[in-house]
Each structure stands twice: as structure tokens, then as C-alpha cells.
Amino acid sequence: MARAHGDARALSTDRAGFLWDPRLASHVYRADHPLKPRRLIGVHDTLEKLGAFGRPNAVVLAPRDATITEIERIHSPAYVHGVQEASADPDRDSSRWGLSAHGDTPPFAGMHEASLLTTGGTLRGMEEVLAGRLRVAFNGAGGLHHAMRDRASGFCIYNDPAIVCGLIADRGLKVAYVDIDAHHGDGVQAAFYDTDQVLTISLHETGRTLFPGTGFAQERGTGKGAGYSINVALPAYTDDRAYTNAFDAVVPPLVSRFGPDVLVTQQGIDSHFTDPLTHLQVSTRAREHVVRAFRGFGLPWVAMGGGGYDLDAVARGWSIDYLVMLDAPIPDELHDADPPAWTGDERDAIDVATDVAVRDALAAAFT
């Protein structure tokens, strides 16, 4: 693959793929669980009503099942076997694998099969992008960035972002992974902590106030990977102005310096100011700004969803994301009418804390 060098014209197509199958939205973690896969129906239906899938560069793709070999690019065979057993018998004790009936990541019947399809959706998108048939592929069901080699965590069973990054890197390509979920992308960072072939950048709420309690600037990688794990730990209640300033100061310059062949993004929408699990105050306006920056990198691009627990924000936010990928107009009704913005002493406090997060992230970066 010829590197795009940040020039959108270097790409052979402007087609944008949207991964969809009703099965991606059909499983249930637990009746009271905050992650509701049915949220994806709202995204699909919103885009369909807007006529997005009828645009000439829109492509609706069916996912496939990931193979065990692909899953084991990141996860241990013992863990995969444990997930299979828990999937077949959710009542068994699977706590050693991070699966607990009353915990964040409960086992459920068919969990393994649902996770193969979710991961396979991201892999199908990757294949189409790397083959040059798509400019970008978006799998809203994916982005499960907390799962570790031997443990489920934070609603995540198989870490599809890490699997995709690893498989792309195995082709000898350099990968820039940018994670804008409100939670630190700890599982992806862990998978590539000692390599300079995958640059991981996570822009998230500080671990001092949010799960998983990690993602500080000093977590910068080891050995050949020193400086290639970048963490922008934002203060709680960061609003649009501070958020976009932080993104612009860190992500475009580091991606440009790294010179990747492929862009991989995790686009959790739980940074939205209505999200019930987080404390960031980001609106759809800042969201659009960030996703337009991703498009502007002019790279082959594999995109995923992630966190998002306010169903209206998910439907509107990810619809905006896909419309940006299509280079289509954004209807006003998708945007927040009155997003929050700090003033006075609160403004100063947020800006100072954000500036510190940016300074520390850049100081830790590769040169």
C-alpha cells in the first residue's frame, strides 16, 4: 500500500462503508446493563431516514465472523476457551476471566458468537479499506478497547481495535490509533506498549475521576515503544473549547510526525455532556470538528464505535460521524441546540488543567 502522506487525493476512492446486520444489535448483556447494543438501531434508522445509504459513495457492509486465529492475535488461547465456556454456560464461575454476573462484564448465552460477529465487522471493514475499495469503514458495534489479553474488562470481551491494529501491523504497515472515548483505551495501549509500529493516542477523562483509573501521560511505552503511547488525561467537565484545543494541539501534529500508513479510530460518544457514566461536557459540535480532522488526514481509515450510554446522543453523534465520512451535509437537527460552555473562574480552571494535560502528553511523545 502506498502511504497517503496526508493527501486525501492520494486515496483511490471516497466510498464510506457502514457495517450493519440486525444481529449486531440483538444481544443483551443484562437487563439493567448500561451498554445496550440496541442503541445501534437508532443510528441505522436515523441515517436511513436521512437518505444517507442512498448516497453514491455509501456502502452498507455485512459483518462476518472473526476466526479464532484472528482473536488470538491479541487474546490468549486459554482466555478464548474461557469465553467459549462462559458463553455456553453463563452460570459457571468465570470470574478468573473478568466475567461476573453482577460485574461490569457479565457472561451471557451466545456471548462468544456475538463477540465474533462484532469483531468480524471491524475486520470486514479493515479488509475493504486495505484493498482500496473503501476510504473508510465504520463499525459502531466495535471499539471494545478495554479487554486485555487474558481478561474481559469494562463491558469488553474481545478487543477488536487491538486485533485490527495488530493484523494491520503484521502486514508491515504503520498504524496510528486514535481513541476519543471518554474512558482510557487501556487494552489497546497494553497490546502495543513496547512497539513503535503502532502509535496509540488516547484523549479521555482523567483516570482520577473515571474508570479504568489509568491513562496518565507518564504511561508512554517501554523499549522500542517509548514515546509511542500518548495519553491526554483531560479534567472532568472539559467542554468543547478546551476539548478541541487539546485535540488540535496533540493529535494532528503527532499523527503527521509519525507518518502512518493507516488510521484506526475508536469513536466512543460517551464524552457527550448528557452521558450518564462520564463527566466530560463535549457536544456534537466538537465531535464533528474531531471527525472532520480524521477525514482530513487523507489516510485509509478503519473506524469503530465504543462507549455511549445516552441513546439519543449515540443516534445523533454516530450519524454525524458517518455523514462526515461520506462528506455529506449535517442536518441542524442532529446537533445539540444549546451545548454547555464554561465562563469566568470555571473557564480559567478548565483551560489551565487542559493545558497541563496537553503539555504533559507532548512532553512524553516520541521525537
Image (spheres, grey):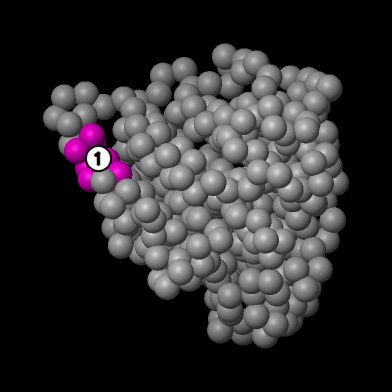
Disc 1 marks a residue whose amino acid type is Asp
Q: Residue at x 52, y 31 (%)?
A: 293
Q: Position of residue 167 (x, y in %)?
A: 70, 63
Q: How would you rate the neighbour count of disc 1 (Cα within 10 Å): few for under 14, some for 14-19, many for 20 or more?
A: some
Q: Residue at x 68, y 71 (%)?
A: 73
Magenta stretch: residue 50 in it?
A: no
Q: Position of residue 71 (x, y in %)?
A: 72, 70
Q: Is 5 situated above or below 266? A: above
Kindly identify which residue carries mark 1.
355
Q: Position of residue 61 (x, y in %)?
A: 83, 42
Q: Is residue 211 visible?
A: no
Identify the element where label 1 is drawn: helix
Query: Which is more toward the observer, 136 or 345?
Result: 136
Magenta stretch: dominant secondary structure: helix
Q: Which span is picked out in magenta?
A: 350-358
Query: Which is more toward the observer, 265 or 320?
Result: 265
Q: Is 341 situated above or below 31? A: above
Q: Residue at x 36, y 64 (%)?
A: 219
From the viewer's perspective, tell me whether residue 16 is left or right of residue 318.
Answer: right
Q: Residue at x 49, y 41 (%)?
A: 256
Quarter-of-image position of residue 239 = top left
